[in-house]
Image (cartoon, helix red, strand yellow):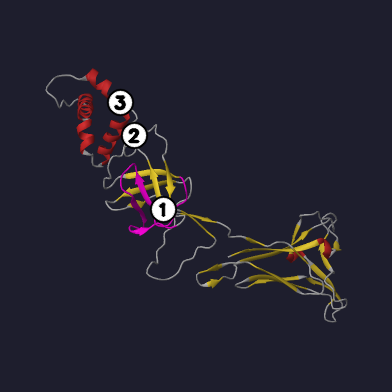
C-alpha cells in the first residue's frame, strides 16, 4: 500500500491527474500524509491539535518519494513488453486506466515492428507513434531497449531516443525534410572483400561493394586495397596485410628501362571497388611486385602466389 500511495502522491505533485478510484481508495492515507507535512512545517490544517508523532509515522511511508516516477515504485523492476504479431503487451498493477499525459516505461522484449501497438493489462491496444502522429516503423527501438512512451489521449507517443541501425543514412528531399536522430548506430557500413588471388597476365581485379540508397548505387567515399600474406614471404607472416600504396613494380616499363613504380591504382564506382596493377612489359607477368622486407627493410621482390588482394570500403 505504501508504495502504491507513494506513487499516487508523487504523480499528484508532478501534476498528473489522479483516478477517482485512487482518490477514494487512499483518501485517509493521503489525508494523514497532508496533515503530517503541515504539522512538520508548522502549519496546522486540522483543528485537533498536535500530530507530531503521527506525522513521523506517516512520513516514514514516503521516504522513497523522490525515486519514484509516475506510479512505479522504486523497488519495481523494469517490466518487459512482449511482442505478439504487431502488439506489445505488458502487465502493471498500478495502471488501471489510460490517462492523458501518462508516461509508461518498459523494456522491449523484441525490436520494434511497423505499426506497433501497446496493450497494458487488459486495456485497449493503443498505436505507438513517432513525430506526433506517424506510426512507428521497424527497428525504431531495439530489443532490450528501455522505451518511454507518453499517452496523448489517442496514441502512445514514442518519447525515448531511437537507435537507428542502417548501412547508410539516406536523407532525401521532400515534405519530410527534418529527420531528427538522437542516437545513430551504423551497422555493416564497412565493406570487406574476400581475399582473391592475383590473376596471372591480367591487369585489373574488382569486387562488388553493394552500397546503394533509394537513388541507386553509391560511390564509396573511402576505398583501401591491401595485399594479404598467405605464406611466409619477405619477412611477412600469414595474415599480415600490406597497404597497396607500399607495393612497387620493378622492371622495364614502356621502354624506360629498369624502374620502380607504384604497383597498384585503386578506385571505385557506384557498383564496384577495383585495382589496376602494373605488368612488366618484358615478361608479361605480374610477378615482379616489391615491398620493403618486414625484417630487414631491404627492397625485396615478393612471390605473388603467396599473397592475395583484399578491399575495404565505406559509403
Question: Could you tell whether 156 is left or right of 166 in the image?
Answer: left
- Vertically, is 270 above or below 154? below
Q: Position of residue 39 (x, y in %)?
A: 20, 24
Please report contact status of discs 1 and 3: CB closer than 8 Å, yes or no: no
Judge depth for marks 3 and 2 and give the one in front.
Answer: 3
Judge depth for marks 1 and 2 and give the one in front.
Answer: 1
Question: Could you tell whether 57 is left or right of 237 in the image?
Answer: left
Q: Which mark is residue 61?
A: 3
Q: Nearer the viewer, residue 75 or 125?
A: 125
Question: Could you tell whether 95 is left or right of 278 in the image?
Answer: left
How far apart in space, not on screen, are marks 1 and 3 (Cα)? 40 Å
Please report contact status of discs 1 and 2: CB closer than 8 Å, yes or no: no
* Quadrant in which the N terminus is drawn: top left
* Quadrant in which the C terminus is drawn: bottom right
Q: Which residues are magenta?
A: 109-137
Residue at left 54%, top 72%?
A: 216
Q: Which mark is residue 236?
A: none
Amino acid at each position: 500500500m505504501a508504495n502504491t500511495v507513494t506513487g499516487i502522491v508523487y504523480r499528484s505533485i508532478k501534476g498528473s491527474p489522479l483516478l477517482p478510484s485512487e482518490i477514494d481508495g487512499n483518501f485517509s492515507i493521503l489525508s494523514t500524509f497532508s496533515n503530517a507535512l503541515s504539522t512538520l512545517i508548522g502549519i496546522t490544517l486540522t483543528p485537533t491539535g498536535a500530530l507530531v508523532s503521527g506525522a513521523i509515522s506517516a512520513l516514514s511511508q514516503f521516504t522513497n518519494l523522490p525515486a519514484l516516477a509516475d506510479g512505479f515504485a522504486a523497488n519495481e523492476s523494469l517490466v518487459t513488453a512482449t511482442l505478439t504479431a504487431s502488439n506489445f503487451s505488458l502487465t502493471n498493477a498500478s495502471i488501471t486506466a489510460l490517462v492523458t499525459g501518462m508516461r509508461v516505461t518498459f523494456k522491449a522484449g523484441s525490436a520494434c515492428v511497423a505499426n506497433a501497438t501497446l496493450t497494458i493489462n487488459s486495456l485497449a491496444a493503443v498505436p505507438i507513434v513517432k513525430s506526433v502522429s506517424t506510426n512507428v516503423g521497424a527497428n525504431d527501438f531495439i530489443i532490450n531497449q528501455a522505451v518511454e512512451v507518453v499517452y496523448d489521449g489517442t496514441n502512445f507517443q514514442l518519447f525515448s531516443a531511437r537507435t537507428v541501425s542502417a548501412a547508410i543514412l539516406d536523407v532525401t528531399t521532400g515534405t519530410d525534410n527534418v529527420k531528427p536522430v538522437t542516437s545513430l548506430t551504423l551497422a555493416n557500413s564497412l565493406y570487406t572483400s574476400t581475399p582473391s588471388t592475383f590473376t596471372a597476365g591480367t591487369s585489373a581485379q574488382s569486387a562488388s561493394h553493394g552500397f546503394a540508397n533509394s537513388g541507386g548505387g553509391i560511390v564509396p567515399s573511402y576505398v583501401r586495397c591491401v595485399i594479404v600474406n598467405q605464406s611466409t614471404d619477405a619477412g611477412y607472416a600469414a595474415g599480415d596485410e600490406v597497404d597497396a600504396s607500399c607495393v612497387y613494380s620493378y622492371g622495364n616499363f614502356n621502354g624506360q628501362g629498369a624502374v620502380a613504380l607504384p604497383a597498384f591504382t585503386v578506385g571505385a564506382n557506384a557498383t564496384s571497388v577495383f585495382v589496376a596493377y602494373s605488368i612488366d612489359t618484358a615478361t608479361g607477368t605480374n610477378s615482379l611486385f616489391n615491398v620493403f622486407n618486414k625484417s630487414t627493410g631491404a627492397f625485396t621482390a615478393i612471390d605473388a602466389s603467396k599473397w592475395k588482394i583484399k578491399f575495404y570500403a565505406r559509403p
